[in-house]
């Protein structure tokens, strides 16, 4: 297939004054990082891996380091320089970052190094990084894999990527517009982190206070008992998750393995039940707002005393409670759980219903604030995704950056 046909296939319609270029023709060099694992030292030159590129800021306190002598040896032909682009090509692929610092460092093979010409370069480095986030590039990356799951990018595949190339003034404006959304997203993410810390602090303070007041503390078995209700094949299947609690399987945004054959042995979960999950030592117990069936590998527990369910929903996810599980988790790994006989001996707060309801109300309000902020973050990220598709294909000319559509989105 000719290059022009391939370019049309992958990029589709573009404005007449835009070019279609392959990445290898735009870059001076596209290089691998170091293939061999070096010898790490306590102090030395940073050695970046794909895990160090997960966030926009590189945390040097967590970066591996190599000696100056080994750095000189392994970077003879691929020394990263300011203005180059790092691109992850193994594991979490497609992450990119413009090198905007001056300190020396080396990279592992999981990171490709894209060197742009110093003079007469036709593409801005930050504009190219935008393209790596976009469907314009990702539809090509997915085409390299027959399964649709890409875990590795080869240099030759990177060189063959087709990119839309507007004139540099338009690249400048597109990058500036998308930068506005990046700034709003970063601020919202920071706000979420602050609210999460506040939630953790409030819960820890009050739950620890209740534990210290011994007259309000009982054993878990005094409030909860295990339930093993089965033989309800007509009930819907539920999934036990750390981030969403117990939810219907069809609400999961990821693929799950559905059981084959009958589900007579599956356990019934009722609204208000808790589940000791297979990773309860990491994230506490999970609460169910639904009725349905879960795998018999889980333990379902139900209150035998009057409780405020929200109070214990918050408590079982708190650091106060998870810390008390630590003595029980020796030898526990994925696929195993804390047995009820051990859980039953854990001390838990059991204050008056008035106190339970009061603290639950406070934590519910914090939950609502967090939920609203997370929904706003999702909105910003979806707006950016849609905006990228419009701008990076020329469907929305950047001269119309203040069109009603963009003004409304930005507002």
Image: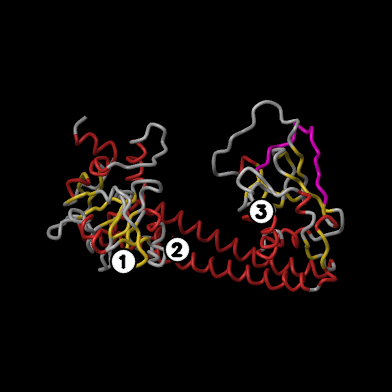
Q: Nearer the viewer, residue 72 or 230?
A: 72
For the point 25% across and 68% down, the residue is 102
Range shown magenta: 225-239
Residue 318 x %, y %: 67, 63
Vertical placement of residue 46 versus 133, above or below = below
Q: CA distance from mark 1 to mark 3?
A: 37 Å
Upstream in the sequence, badge 2 or badge 3?
2
How many numbered callouts?
3
- Of circles 2 and 3, the one toward us is 3
CA separation in Å, label 2 and label 3: 38 Å
Mark 2 Cα shell of 10 Å, populated few (<14), some (14-19), many (≥20): some
The residue positioned farthest toward the left in the image shown: 119
Mark 3 neighbour class, 10 Å CA radius: few under 14, some 14 to 19, many 20 or more: some
Lateral position of residue 175 relative to residue 361, left or right: left
Q: Dot 1 lies on which element? A: strand
Read off the residue under disc 3: 329
Queried whether the magenta region covers residue 67, the answer comes back as no
Residue 401 is situated, as x and y percent measured from the top left of the image, at 33, 61
The part of the image, by quadrant, that contains residue 334 is: top right
Towards the viewer: 358 or 341: 341
Residue wearing tag 2: 185
In the image, is 359 to the left or to the right of 145? right
Element type where label 3 sits in the image? loop
Residue 44: mark: 1
**Left or right side of 226 for 297:** left
Cβ atoms under marks 2 and 3 closer than 8 Å: no
For marks 1 and 2, the one nearer the N-term is 1
State the image coordinates of residue 159 (x, y, percent, origin top left): 23, 43
């Amino acid at each position: 297939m000719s290059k022009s046909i391939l370019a049309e296939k992958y990029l589709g319609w573009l404005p007449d004054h835009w070019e279609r270029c392959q990445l290898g023709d735009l870059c001076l060099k596209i290089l691998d990082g170091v293939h061999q694992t070096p010898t790490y030292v306590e102090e030395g030159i940073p050695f970046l891996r794909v895990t160090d590129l997960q966030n926009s800021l590189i945390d040097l306190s967590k970066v591996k380091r190599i000696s100056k002598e080994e750095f000189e040896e392994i970077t003879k032909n691929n020394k990263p320089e300011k203005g180059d682009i790092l691109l992850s090509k193994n594991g979490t692929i497609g992450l990119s970052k413009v090198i905007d610092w001056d300190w020396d460092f080396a990279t592992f093979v999981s990171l490709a190094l894209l060197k742009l010409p110093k003079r007469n370069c036709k593409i801005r480095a930050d504009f190219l990084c935008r393209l790596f986030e976009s469907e314009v590039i990702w539809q090509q990356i997915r085409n390299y894999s027959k399964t649709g799951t890409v875990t590795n990018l080869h240099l030759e595949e990177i060189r063959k990527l087709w990119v839309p190339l507007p004139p540099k003034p338009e690249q400048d404006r597109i990058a500036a517009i998308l930068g506005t959304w990046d700034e709003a997203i970063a601020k919202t993410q920071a706000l979420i982190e602050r609210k999460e810390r506040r939630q953790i602090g409030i819960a820890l303070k009050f739950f620890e206070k209740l534990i210290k007041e011994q007259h309000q503390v009982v054993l878990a078995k005094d409030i909860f008992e295990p339930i093993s209700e089965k033989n309800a094949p007509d009930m819907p299947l539920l999934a036990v998750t750390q981030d969403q609690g117990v939810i219907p399987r069809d609400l999961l945004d990821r693929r799950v393995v559905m059981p084959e054959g009958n589900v007579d042995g599956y356990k019934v979960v009722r609204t208000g039940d808790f589940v000791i999950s297979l990773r309860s030592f990491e994230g506490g117990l999970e609460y169910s707002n639904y009725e349905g069936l879960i795998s018999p590998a889980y333990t379902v527990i139900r209150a035998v005393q009057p409780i405020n369910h929200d109070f214990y929903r918050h408590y079982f996810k708190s650091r106060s409670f998870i810390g008390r599980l630590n003595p029980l988790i020796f030898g526990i790994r994925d696929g195993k759980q804390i047995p009820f006989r051990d859980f039953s001996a854990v001390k838990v707060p059991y204050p008056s219903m008035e106190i339970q309801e009061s603290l639950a109300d406070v934590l519910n309000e914090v939950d609502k604030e967090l939920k609203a902020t997370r929904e706003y973050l999702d909105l910003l990220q979806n707006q950016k995704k849609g905006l990228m598709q419009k701008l990076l294909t020329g469907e929305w000319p950047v001269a119309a950056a203040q069109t009603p559509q963009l003004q409304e989105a930005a507002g």
